[in-house]
Each structure stands twice: as C-alpha cells, then as structure tokens.
Image (tube, rainbow, N blue to C red):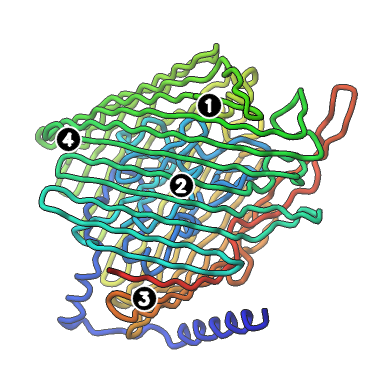
Amino acid sequence: MKQIYMAIWGYRRVVFFYLLLGSPLISADVDTLLEEYNHKNVLSQRTIDANKGHLILFTREKLEKMHAKTLKDVFKTTPVIYYHENRYAVTDPLMSGNVEAYRSNFIRLYVDGVEVTQGWAGSGLLLYGDVNIDFVDHIEFYYMTPSLESSVEPAFLTIFLYSKDPARDSGGKMNLIGGSRGYNMQTVSYGEAREDFSYMVNLSHTDAKREKVDNGTPTPLSRDFERLQLFAYLKTETQMFHLQIMKKYTDSLAGASWDATPLTSEIDYTNLHTDYSISLSENWHFLVSYDWLKMDMQESDDQPIIWTYPYPRYSFNATTENSTLTGELSYKKVIGNHHLNAGIKNRYKTLDSVKVDSQTVSLPSFNKERITSIFFQDQYALTPEQLLTLGISYSDIDRNGGIADDSLLHLRLGYIFTNEKWSYKTYLYRTQVALEPLVRYFFPQLSSDIKPQTTLGITQEVAYRWEKQRIRLILNWMEDEDSLMQTTLGSENETKYFTSIFEYDYKFDQDNQVNLQLYYARYEDIFNIDLLHDISGYISFFNTYDSFDFYNGVVWHRNSLDWKNYYDWTSSITWNVNDSLTLTLKGDNLLDKAKESSLYRYDIVPNSLGYSVTPAEPLSISPIDRRVTLELEYLF
C-alpha cells in the first residue's frame, strides 16, 4: 500500500512540475499550420447544427486528450445537468435522492442520430450513462429546447454520440486498462471502408471494482458491475444499420431497502438495440428502431422492502421484459430561403412479461403506451448570416388499463446570427412532458390523472471569437406548470429555473490550450426544496511536449444545500511510443473530494396498519470513484 501512495505522490509532483513550466508559445510557421489542419475534427464540423440548441461540444481531439473511456468521464464535466447515480446505482442526473423509480426521462440519448431508449423503464441514459465510448468520434450535448425533428418525446438535454468513420479509422485497435481495486477494461474494434459500404465492430468488457459505501453495518453498500458491450454498424450512401447489445451484472447499491441496509441488492440487465434507416429519395427518409430490455432483480432485507406496500415482503426476486418499437418518416425540402422539415413518428412501448420468484404473473391492466407525433419546422434564411426558425410538434399519447391519455403541444421560435467573430442565438419555447410509464406502473391510482408538465422558457446565447480566444455566455429561464420535478406528484407549485453558463477558451497553439467553464443555477420549488443555488465550474489544461500528452481537469461544485466545496481532479500523462502504441497513466478524483449527493433513508416502524416510514439520517455518496489506471493502446 505504501508503494501505491508513493507512486501517486510522485505522479502528482510530475504533473505540478509540468504545470509550473507553463505552455510555450509556438510561432505560426508552415509546419505548425499544417499540423493544426491535421488536428481538426472534420466530422465534428460537419455535424454541428446551430439550430439543434445550445451546444457543449466534445471533439475527437478533446476526447482523446481527456482519455475519456466512458460517457461518465465526459458527463461529469458538463454544466447545470451533470452526472449522478440513483439508489440503484444507475445513471440518473435528475434524481432527488429520494425513493423513486427514475427521474431522467427529460434527457434523451442518440447514437448516429438514432435514439436509444429503455422505453418503459426510462431514458436510454439508464444504461448508456457510463457506456464505453471507444467507438465514438465526438459527442454533442444540446441544452434546453431541442430541434423538434430530434425525438419522438420531449427533452431538455439531448446527447448525440457519433461513431467513428472507417474512412479515417480503418483497421483495428485494442485497449487494455487496469487500475485500483482490480478495475479492468478490455476493448477491441475493427473497421473498414469498402467501395460501396463501410462497417465497424467494437467489443468491450468492463469489470468495475468500485468504492464501497459505509451504511453503518458490517456489510457496506456495493455498486460493482461487470459489463459486456457490442457495437456494430453497416453503412452505405443511403442506408444505415446498427446493432448494439449490452449485458450488465450489477450490485445495485441501496436498491429497494428503505434504510439502505439490504441483505441482497442485485440487478442484471440485458439490452438490445437495433435500427435501420434509408433515404428513399433526396427528400424522404425512413427510420425504424427496436429496443428490448430484460431486468433480473434480486432484493432482500430484514425489513419490508420498497414497492411491496401494503402487502409487505422481505424478499423480492423478479424478472421483467419491456420493448419499444419506433418508426419515423420525414420530409426535407428547400424552397427559396425556406428549409422545410416535417414528419410523423410513432413509438410503441410495452411491458411484455413479469415473473416473480420464477413464476409468470398476470400483467397489470396498464402495460402499453403508444405515442404518435407530427412535427413541422421552417428554417428561414433572412440573410447568409441570419436564420429565423419556427417549429411546432403535436403528440398524442394513448394508454390502456384505464390510465388517462395525454396530448402534448410543443412550440419553438428562434433567431440565429453568426459571422466569423460574433454569434447570437435566442429561443422562445413551450414544451409539455408527461409522466413516464414506470411511475404510473408503480402508482397507478395516484398517477392516473396527473396532468402533463407545461414548461415555458426563453434562452439567450452570445459568443465572440478572436485570434486564439473564444468567449461565450448562455442564459436560460424556465417555469413549469404542474411540475413533475417535485416530490409530490401533481403539486400545484410551479418550479422555476434560471441558469447561466460562461465559457472561455484560450489556445496557445494546437497542442497547448486551456478551457474554463463557470455556471450559476437558481431553482425554486424543485423536489422538496424551496430555493436552491448552485455555483460550479470546470477548468482543463491540454498540453503536449515532444511525445508526451498531458491533461489536467478540475470539476468544482458548490450549492446552497451545505455550501461545501467539492473538487474532482482528473489527470493523465500519455506517452506516444510510436504511431501504433501509446501508454497512459490516469488518475480520477485524485483528491477524493468529488461531488456527493444525498441518498435518503427511512426507518420502518410496525403499527396496527402494518408499518410506518420515518426519515433517518441520509447517506452522502459520490458517483465518482477515486482511481488510478494504466492503459495500453495498440493500433493494428
């Protein structure tokens, strides 16, 4: 153990010594200009659509400099909405820490423009929040109201993962990672671009030995997991096919234990996603996708477990299967200065089967939900530098089992101006969101007549770029009516949000740069909190010296719950041995002071009605482990 601490201390000294040296300015000679050109991420530039929303971009270059291996490595650095895990140890950035199923359906995730969803269970983020991203070229986070052609269902944050192109990444790659507590990851991928088509196959295995959480008993909470992940695609000029399979075995932290002292808490997931899309003509595009999720849950406690009231059980072994089928037909056409986009989408979610103690049980009356959406969007070019955009979307949600149907109306009006130095963007929007199926499934009587949440908002973004610097400010104000972001369903209080994001980037040269991000958020009546202030930031340094790359990033969080400062320092040193081999030493949360969040606990007290639930001292848990890893990457 002493040797490990000595190694970490030596590693810190190297990093701090390097930072003290500073970043040398390099003259813009011909070689440097050529090098800068080669470093540019062509794919990122092609896919940035200014009208999708307010963009936080992670280019191919940035992901490689960060040595981000999972979406979690990236997500933890984003402003306002950042990485969290709930009591079941799955990604849930909007979780409140209370006893709830899943909160983050406001966040939608896409791979190559196709949404991945767990349908009945929730947003695709549920399993893909810490997905291995070795197959990813770049990532786009779009904040607040998205472009209305994006999703069948509304969102306040849309995440786009774009896969690597064999035209640039032909051949194979292997990654081997080992780290603290026996953490290990292996990844192999191969891609090739043929004359008429291209393909890529990526296979990864992760055995995550994570930090345990003290719950006041001899058996601390565990969130270890093992994951096997397959990503593959086949593309032509007009067609695209994806296959994604994930098998994940997890220790699910507190799970269904009221007081966070489970005897057993395990959930195993088997997830399948496949999609096919084709450009029928210059204007018409068709897409169909299928998602299937199987969950095997094993929960036991010495007290009645959650979700079994009013017929308490002390153990609960269940297997559920749900599926989602999505179809889209869209039409695009340019008429003069009008860029028109319209379409129809249909999504069908079903709870397919439920088994308890290996015995098939009858499905509840509510086990199907169908969403039909139509949208129209016009992007009108006022001048080559100005764009006026108008979008409207209507969704009809049909449910069985006597659960009330919903109709949702979304409106968005925007204006964009951009030139070589200045850019300005503003949106005025109305978005409606319905309560997700999983909560309705657990509380059918309570949620049968819950109204959709209606959100009104306005955003502003201004940016200025000059020479080697860029500065940007994003402002957003929103107000919810019939808010779903509160502890009590159907609360008449209106949740209000104000957020501001400030960014500053300075590029000394292509290999040496600094990025600063600060944000402030103010929330009224969110969850069970009357007023919440959040002040946080992120600063990163990218440096290259000879054959060595250095990355240092610090995430800072502070809010009015306790006004405590949290720091997550990530640092890496990469040795580019040759064109085919690199070695990387990386440390995550080196100060062991990453953001913590509360996991609420309750004592169970027997009474004449069965039992009552009273609040107990919550646990403070960070989703970011302290870890040191060594990585070998080999290209072949």
Q: CA distance from mark 4 to mark 1?
A: 32 Å
Residue at point 37%, 44% (across, down): 244
Determine crowd level at label 2: few under 14, some 14-19, many 20+ residues with C-alpha closer than 10 A. many
Of residues 629 and 468, the one drawn nearer to the viewer in this rendering: 629
First in residue order: circle 2 vs circle 3: 2
Of residues 307 and 267, the one drawn nearer to the viewer in this rendering: 267
Per the image, label 4 sits on a secondary structure element best described as: strand
Per the image, label 1 sits on a secondary structure element best described as: helix
Query: Can you tell which of label 2 and label 3 is closer to the viewer?
Result: 3
Quadrant into which the N terminus falls: bottom right
Query: Can you tell which of label 2 and label 1 is closer to the viewer?
Result: 2
Where does label 4 land, which residue? 279
Callout 2 amino acid: Tyr
First in residue order: circle 3 vs circle 1: 1
Image location (x, y in percent) of residue 548: 37, 81
Residue at point 41%, 33% (across, down): 154
Where does label 2 land, which residue? 128
Query: Can you tell which of label 3 and label 1 is closer to the viewer?
Result: 3
Residue at point 54%, 50% (across, down): 521
Where does label 3 land, which residue? 582
Image quadrant of residue 601? Answer: top right
First in residue order: circle 3 vs circle 4: 4
Question: How many dots with numbers?
Answer: 4
Callout 3 amino acid: Thr
